[in-house]
């Protein structure tokens, strides 16, 4: 029996599934956000008056995607407090298949805010929620300005403006929509890897893709009416896995707001399992390999 508290119940809707016919990462994030919001209140980690401020204080999310959530999958969202410090706390949220109990995804989420009271009960971090291939660290590219990132070899895959229906009451982009904006941009990245033989990972044939792990670190927020730009590159390639770096910038300031790393696979859509990266796609991806930047100067 899970030591986590069930605080959310929902399911996978058809319109939440992507070209791979499974729950898109933006809706994993949205359902985890529902779990987090209800859970913070249920556990006494926030009050209705402090909830928005607490949610906007998120510093990092480490996400593991453990099983596909297909259409009509019944979901239970659970939460537990992992630990606290004087000025921060970390919680674990999970989505489980309500019918089978299978863990679909686990998110470890750290907030830079002081708790008024420190609950006595903590839960251990399960093995399935720990790091698989992405380290628990801030991205080494996060200090780069937009201009520096483009000079470093990042390419623009997304650009737009934050709209009112994406924002909280105080005009800041809702936390789960940072993932949404990156997800929207991904087909533009796949297009860079396309060839006449392999036109791109759009789910039109037998090949698709899936994310195994994600880490996002936050250093600011995007606001209503603010323009943003998403830039990406490839950090490493293995036989089946692809290690991406995504950075979300404010166009107005040129400053990185969210730095992310993602571990993804190419997926056989018939067998529903990982497949090796083809030679032609590997060659295309290698043109976008990044090199580690120099460390940020200490002020």
Image: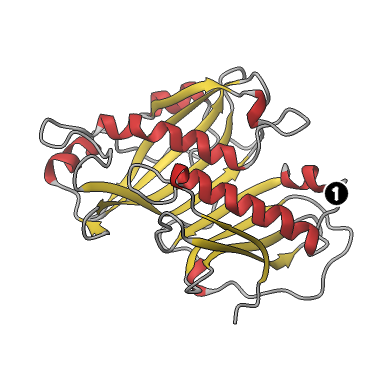
Q: In this view, does 10 lie above or below 178?
A: below
Q: How is the image coloured?
A: secondary structure
Near-viewer residue (77 or 154): 77
Near-viewer residue (287 or 170): 170
Q: In this view, does 126 lie above or below 256?
A: below
Q: Which residue lies furthest to the left in this view?
A: 197
How many numbered badges does the structure rendering display? 1
Residue at horizontal 84%, vertical 66%? 118
Q: Quick one: quadrant of the C terminus?
A: top right
Query: Is 50 displayed left or right of 172 in the figure?
Result: right
Residue at horizontal 65%, vertical 77%? 3
Spot occupied by residue 198 in the image (x, y as percentages of width and height) = 15, 37
Q: Quick one: quadrant of the N terminus?
A: bottom right
Question: Can residue 242 be seen by looking at this rendering?
Answer: yes
Rendering quarter of residue 69: bottom left
- Within 10 Å of disc 1 (Cα), the crowding (few <14, some 14-19, many 20+) is few
Query: Is 52 displayed left or right of 292 in the figure?
Result: right
Q: What element carries label 1?
A: loop
Spot occupied by residue 159 in the image (x, y as percentages of width and height) = 48, 22
Residue at horizontal 52%, vertical 46%? 27
Residue at horizontal 63%, vertical 56%? 109
Spot occupied by residue 243 in the image (x, y as percentages of width and height) = 35, 48
Disc 1: which residue: 48
Spot occupied by residue 7 in the image (x, y as percentages of width and height) = 69, 63
Near-viewer residue (294 or 102): 102
């Amino acid at each position: 029996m899970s030591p986590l508290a069930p605080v959310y119940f929902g399911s996978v809707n058809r319109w939440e599934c992507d070209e791979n016919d499974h729950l898109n990462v933006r809706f994993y994030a949205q359902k985890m956000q529902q779990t987090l919001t209800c859970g913070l209140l249920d556990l006494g980690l926030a009050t209705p008056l402090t909830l928005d401020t607490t949610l906007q204080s998120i510093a990092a999310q480490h996400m593991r995607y453990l099983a596909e959530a297909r259409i009509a999958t019944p979901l239970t969202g659970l939460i537990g407090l992992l630990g606290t410090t004087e000025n921060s706390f970390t919680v674990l949220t999970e989505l489980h298949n309500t019918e089978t109990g299978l863990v679909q995804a686990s998110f470890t989420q750290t907030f830079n805010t002081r708790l008024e009271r420190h609950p006595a009960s903590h839960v251990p971090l399960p093995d399935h929620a720990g790091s698989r291939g992405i380290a628990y660290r801030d991205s080494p590219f996060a200090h780069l300005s937009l201009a520096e990132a483009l000079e470093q070899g990042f390419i623009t895959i997304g650009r737009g403006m934050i709209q009112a229906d994406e924002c909280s009451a105080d005009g800041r982009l809702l936390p789960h929509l940072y993932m949404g904006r990156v997800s929207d941009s991904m087909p533009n990245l796949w297009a860079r890897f396309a060839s006449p033989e392999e036109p791109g990972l759009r789910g039109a044939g037998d090949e698709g893709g899936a994310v195994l792990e994600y880490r996002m670190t936050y250093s600011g927020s995007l606001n209503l009416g603010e323009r943003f730009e998403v830039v990406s590159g490839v950090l490493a390639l293995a036989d089946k896995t692809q290690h991406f770096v995504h950075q979300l910038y404010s166009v107005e300031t040129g400053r990185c707001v969210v730095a992310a790393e993602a571990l993804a696979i190419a997926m056989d859509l018939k067998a529903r399992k990982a497949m090796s990266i083809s030679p032609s796609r590997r060659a295309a991806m290698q043109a976008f390999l990044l090199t580690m930047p120099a460390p940020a100067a200490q002020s």
